[in-house]
Image (cartoon, coloured by chain):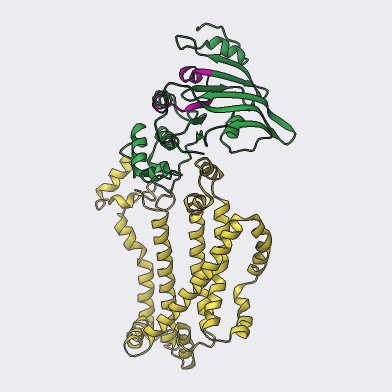
Amino acid sequence: MSNLEQAAGTIDLPQTTSGAGSGTWRYRALSPLALQALSWLAPVLLIVIWEAAAQGGYLSPQVLPAPSKVIRTAVKLTTQGTLLNDLGVSLLRAAAGFAIGGAAGFALGILVGFSAVAEALIDRSIQMVRAIPFLAMLPLVIVWLGVGEAEKVFLVALGVTFPIYINTTLGIRQVDPKLIELGRVQDLSTLQLIRRIILPGALPSILTGVRYALATAWLALVVAETIGAQSGLGFLAMDAREFLRTDVIVLTIVIYALIGVGADLIARWLERRLLAWHPNYGAAR
Amino acid sequence: MTVQFAPPSQSAPAPAVIVNGLRRAYGDRTVIEGLDLRIERGEFVALLGESGCGKTTLLRALAGLDPVQGGRIIAPRRPAVVFQEHRLLPWDSLWRNVALGLDVPDARARVAAALAEVGLGDRLDDWPRNLSGGQAQRVALARALVQQPELLLLDEPFAALDALTRIRMHALVRELVANHRPGVLLVTHDVDEAITLADRILVMRDGRIAYEHRANDSGTIARGDLLAELGVLAAPAHG
């Protein structure tokens, strides 16, 4: 290995220590920085070709507007329009739905994870409801709650509850029984046992649930907002459709994508922070 | 269930545990039947026996981990246990691990002293995954002793360690037990380990204590006799 590293070193930029973690068995002719740059090549090239095609008149603006046009629209809608307001409304709906659904899923998961009686009582019902694709509930939810804020928040909460619930119960069941036994030997109270051993042990699984839930929350919001919204990103897109404003539609899609990436980054950051002890997550310390 | 903070008296022998007529069965299968045992404070007792003879079952019963079907166990309070695996919580720093279940106001100071005793006094805020097997087992020892137990149960705690580390651990355990003077019950399948550490060796067979051997005046135990009791044919060369 050292020969290989040296051979690579002669044509390499100085290696940073942080880059040594992954793929050290592979031959690397480029430094991690160069590889990082290389990974951006394809997406950037794609956008350049897209822009060129649009400028050259090969793409009708009605079908797919140029990236530059989308950016100009973004600036215009931010300064003169309601883009920030709509974005805020959407984020608020997602946050409210996530908080409600997450709390419900977590509470139910804890209950079922700890109590066989609770499991017998409610787990089958939850599994049955879970079998329904939650978006199929939309017409019913609209009948119940109309097309206001409540319907949107409810739909997001519905999508969030199940992944959190399932991963919480799973995590609790996967806690090492030997550590629970240790807790008994150390004379922990039930509350201490939960706080010191069971919840930390279940945390990796719970955070996996959070990541799934972020994705479904976002999906639920997109669907809910395309129906009868008066504000929000989905409303912006639907409104733009009326006027064939493809640039605005593309803009909302890009924003949805960016927020999805942002949510995933937050989830990863949470994992790195909360699971710093875990060999599969967290930075070595 | 009283917690004693005063140092234990060194002179008068007081029982760390008394077991009378213990019975333990899994369904129809009786593993322990009519077992009597008494361990004094400061006394180091090793328990030998073939696999499946009920050694670990007895230890788990004493630890209060399994229910018993008959007899009495009288212990001043819950004994401390060191298992074969270190069982450190990977999400807690070493000091939080040692402090697990330690409900005293000066927990961190007590933990620091306990970790210093096992030679890891500078690793309070380190993490279990940075420890070697021997170091992790030393932390487990500290976690047991910081509770100031009157009875310390050791369930093959050195079995997974390499030979050199095991020798160092033997010396450390002897020193710790001499300082803290709990009654100790060591379950092991290593005859030489039992001879090295114990004041008294019990051999378990068919769910009862079948043989008992005390160290003689010079502190040695007849290895040959012991091996014969365990059903191993060996020339009784060592005295």
On whether residue B193 falls in the magenta region, the answer is yes
**What residue do we see at 35% from left, 44% from top?**
B106
Q: Which residues are magenta?
A: B176-200
**Rendered view: A115 above or below A220:** above
Depicted B195 relative to depicted A259: above or below: above
Residue A261, quarter of the rendered image = bottom left
Q: Is residue A85 magenta?
A: no
The correct choice, above or below, for A263 with respect to A7 in the image is: below
Chain in yellow (letter): A
Residue A19, given in percent of the width and then of the height, sits at 32, 52
Which x, y percent locates residue B131? Answer: 39, 38
Residue A251 in view of the camera: no
* Residue A20 appears in the figure: yes
Near-viewer residue (A142 or B106): B106
In the rendered structure, the answer to whether residue A276 lies left or right of residue B205 reads: left
Q: Give the camera-side residue of A254 and A275.
A: A275
Determine the residue located farthest toward the bottom in the rendered image: A243
Chain letter, colour green: B
Pick whichever, B187 or B133, lies toward us: B187
Q: Quadrant of residue B100?
A: top left
Q: Position of residue A56 (x, y in %)?
A: 36, 85
